[in-house]
């Protein structure tokens, strides 16, 4: 059976969800990556579109920013940009990130 869109494992979610941009203090150049240094100027996180299922079975979707990651529990705290609602999402319940399906099995 042919797949129409690319799929990734839920363990590779970090490369899509935790991207930041910041300016270096010394050179003034804009950089991007996962962990900005402590002396970075204006660190901001890149928002992304996420669709996930809650533990009660509801499908939620929207533009979000990752606030905190719980690596041991495979969970992340996200903030929806439109409603400013903060939720804790389990990584294995995420269905789609920026149009890329996430394989959860």
Image (cartoon, rainbow, N blue to C red):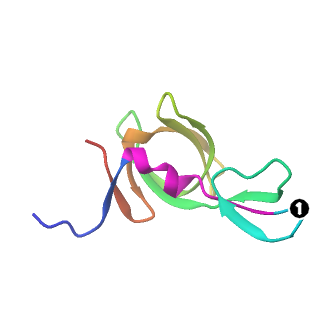
Is there any visible trace of residue 76 in the rendered image?
yes
Residue occupying the far front of the picture: 26
Identify the residue at horizontal 46%, vertical 34% (top origin): 74
Identify the residue at horizontal 82%, vertical 47% (top origin): 38
Report x, y in % for residue 73.
48, 28
Report x, y in % for residue 60.
44, 49
In the image: residue 27, left or right of residue 81: right
Q: Is residue 41 above or below residue 87?
A: below
Identify the residue at horizontal 50%, vertical 57% (top origin): 16
Is there any visible trace of residue 59 in the rendered image?
no
| Quadrant including the C terminus | top left
Magenta-highlighted residues: 10-23
Residue 88, by quadrant, is: top right
Identify the residue at horizontal 60%, vertical 60% (top origin): 47
Query: Is label 1 in a helix, a strand or a loop?
Result: loop
Residue occupying the far left of the picture: 1
Report x, y in % for residue 11.
40, 44
Report x, y in % for residue 48.
54, 61
Q: Is residue 14 magenta?
A: yes
Q: Nearer the viewer, residue 34 or 77?
A: 34
In the image: residue 103, left or right of residue 47: left
In the image: residue 31, left or right of residue 97: right
In the image: residue 84, left or right of residue 39: left
Q: Nearer the viewer, residue 72 or 53?
A: 72
| Quadrant including the N terminus | bottom left
Residue position for label 1: 25
Q: Is residue 28 magenta?
A: no
Q: Residues within 10 Å of mark 1 (few under 14, many from 20)?
A: few
Q: Is residue 51 above or below residue 88?
A: below
């Amino acid at each position: 059976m042919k797949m129409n869109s690319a799929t990734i494992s839920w363990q590779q979610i970090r490369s899509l969800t935790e991207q930041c941009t910041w300016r270096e203090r010394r050179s003034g150049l804009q950089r991007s990556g996962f962990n900005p240094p402590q002396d970075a100027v204006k660190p901001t996180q890149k928002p992304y579109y996420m669709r996930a299922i809650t533990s009660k079975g509801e499908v939620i979707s929207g533009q979000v920013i990752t606030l905190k990651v719980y690596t041991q529990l495979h969970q992340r705290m996200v903030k929806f940009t439109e409603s400013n609602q903060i939720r804790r999402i389990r990584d294995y319940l995420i269905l789609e990130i920026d149009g890329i399906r996430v394989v959860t099995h």
